[in-house]
Structure formats: structure tokens, C-alpha cells
Image (tube, grey):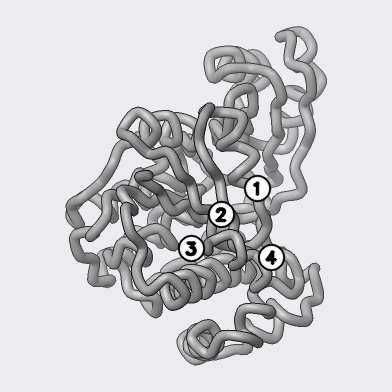
Amino acid sequence: MAKALVFPGQGAQYVGMGMTLAAQFPVARRLLDEADAVLGFSLSRIMGEGPESELTRTDISQPAILVASVMGLAVVREKIGHLPDVQAVAGLSLGEYTALVAAEALTFADAVRLVRIRGVAMQAAAEAVPSGMVALIGPDEATAQKLCDAAAEGEVLQVANLNATGQVVISGTKAACDRAVALAKDFSIRRAMPLPVAGAFHSALMAPAAQQLKAALAATPITDPRIPVYANVHAQPVTRAAEIPDLLVRQLTNPVRWAESMQRMQAAGISDFWEIGPSKHLSGMIARTVQNVVCKNLDKAEDLAQFG
């Protein structure tokens, strides 16, 4: 059966992630050590010991999630020997960088550097303007946009993540987010929940971070992906290196079209989704969006049993 590898984004982090893999598989330990060397500080210590307050910082969680996910990918490759029938890869927001590593468009070291720069820039942009994100349960994109139009009152408020059928996240200034929560029931939205994030990711408020990321990408070697990478911005497969930098820059200020990516993968013949990385958030989103597919997860060493 044709399969896709999918990789998590920010929010998947937890203290201890990747540690069972590092303890049992030298290939995973080497990647953890390489990340520490690239960054110049002990990311491995924060991943293994916390504190949680440090791990959840945008500038720390982003490289940590990427590293833990690539560790899992390396272990799966080592156990299976190769990955047969992988027709596509994708990652949720930050996870798109892991997908590019899996597709051999980015080296691991360059991806670690990029997501560290991305995380620092996003943290700074978040701190510059009081802002946030709100998860909406029930609406489609059009309804979520109508809520944004009603609550914005001249401030930034826009659709940020289309995660699954009936699960949309909006992003903007804190005041606009507060108004959206108050107005949600008027639009027949079942629940509107502020998210514990640093700021308004995937919105116009991330424009300063996008400019910093653009400069970093211009200095980073990128090659044609060996496997099509479904991009968050347009939910289409990407096979040319020349397209990638612009898509990664636009991703910071545009909606993440995750549900649409899953639907298009299924339409292209994907029937198995392997989620590799900390936590198991993506499988739930996939199950709510596409039917008659198989999902497997690799987070901890014990999860390897399901890969045969």
C-alpha cells in the first residue's frame, strides 16, 4: 500500500521526548549529539530534563521537535532497511522542515539551524505585539473567516490552521482573539478555545519573522526533494528546490492547509500514513478528515513493534 510520512509541528513537545530512542539506538543518539553541536547548547538536556517552561518556548520547541522527529525517522529506516512505497511526505507547519529532511531536500544540520532561526524570529515577533490563537470546533473555513471579519475591528485576525474537518485555528491580536471567542456562538461555532501559544502564528503579525527567515533560506543549500513534499501553503506536492524557500517564507503568514493536504494525498493513492515524531496529534486530525486509511505512530521505542 502506498504510504506517506507525516511529521508534527509545535505543540507536540513534551519533556522526555526522543529519550527512549536515544537510549536504545546509537543512530538516534548521534543525531541528538549533532544537534547540540550545531546549536552550541545542550538541546538534548532540555528535551530530556526540561523544565517544561523552557522546552515550550518557541525558539527551543521548534528545533527540539524537529530533532526528535528525525531521530524517529532514522530509527525506522534502520529497522526496516528502507522505506518501501513512500510516495509523499508532509509536516504540520514546523514539521514541513522535517519532511524536507526526509525527502533529502535539506540536510539535518541545515534544518536544525533554520528552525532555530525561525523559532527565535517567531518568538520576537510574538513578543512585539500582544497576540494569540483560538481553536474553533465546528466551522468550515468560510464560517471561520466570517467570524474573523466580524471580530477584527481593524486589527489582524485571520484563519491560520485548517487542521481537520471541523477544526480551524484563527490567529491575531489578543483583543481581536478575545472578541472572536465572545462572538463564536453567533456563528454556530460549538467551541472557541484560546490556545497556550506565544503569539499569532501564521498571520500577518509574523511578517518580521518571515523576512528574517527569507534571509536565512537564501544562504541555505536546498536540493530537489527525492519524494514529493506537500506544502502547507497550497496543499500541493512540491518536487523542485526552487519553489521551497518562497513556500517556507509564505507559510509564516498564511494558513496551514493540513486537512486539504491529507485529502489530496488520499486522492493521489495514499492509504497509509506514518506519523513520526513526538506525541500523536496528527493521526487524530487525519482520522477526522479522510476515511479508510491506516495510521501508524512512532514516538517512543516501544512503538516500533507496529512497524513489523
Q: Nearer the viewer, mark 4 or mark 1?
A: 1
Q: Nearer the viewer, mark 4 or mark 2?
A: 2
Amino acid type, callout 2 = Pro
Amino acid type, callout 4 = Arg
Q: Nearer the viewer, residue 136 or 91?
A: 91
Q: Please give the name of the residue rendered at 82% of the width and 20% of the height, measured from the top-left corner.
A: 182
Question: Distance between the Cα atoms at labels 4 and 1?
Answer: 19 Å
Looking at the image, is mark 3 or mark 1 earlier in the sequence? 3
Question: Distance between the Cα atoms at labels 3 and 1?
Answer: 22 Å
Q: Are marks 2 and 1 in contact (CB under 8 Å)?
A: yes
Q: Is residue 235 above or below residue 32?
A: above
Q: Secondary structure at mark 3?
A: helix
Image coordinates of residue 76 in percent, x first then y, are: 48, 70
Q: Secondary structure at mark 1?
A: helix
Question: Distance between the Cα atoms at labels 4 and 2?
Answer: 16 Å
Question: What label does residue 185 carry, if any?
Answer: none
Q: Please give the name of the residue rendered at 73% of the width and 37% of the height, measured from the top-left corner.
A: 174
- Disc 1 residue crowd, few under 14, some 14–19, many 20+, Cα 10 Å: some
Q: Which residue is mark 4?
A: 57
Looking at the image, is mark 4 or mark 1 earlier in the sequence? 4
Looking at the image, is mark 3 or mark 2 earlier in the sequence? 2
Residue 267 appears left or right of 50: left
Question: What label does residue 8 carry, if any?
Answer: 2
Q: Is residue 182 above or below residue 281?
A: above
Res 105 quadrant in image:
bottom left
Looking at the image, is mark 4 or mark 2 earlier in the sequence? 2
Amino acid type, callout 3 = Arg
Image coordinates of residue 3 in percent, x first then y, are: 39, 48
Q: Please give the name of the residue rendered at 71% of the width and 50% of the height, measured from the top-left corner.
A: 197
Q: Secondary structure at mark 2?
A: loop
Q: Nearer the viewer, mark 3 or mark 1?
A: 1
Q: Is residue 87 above or below residue 62?
A: above
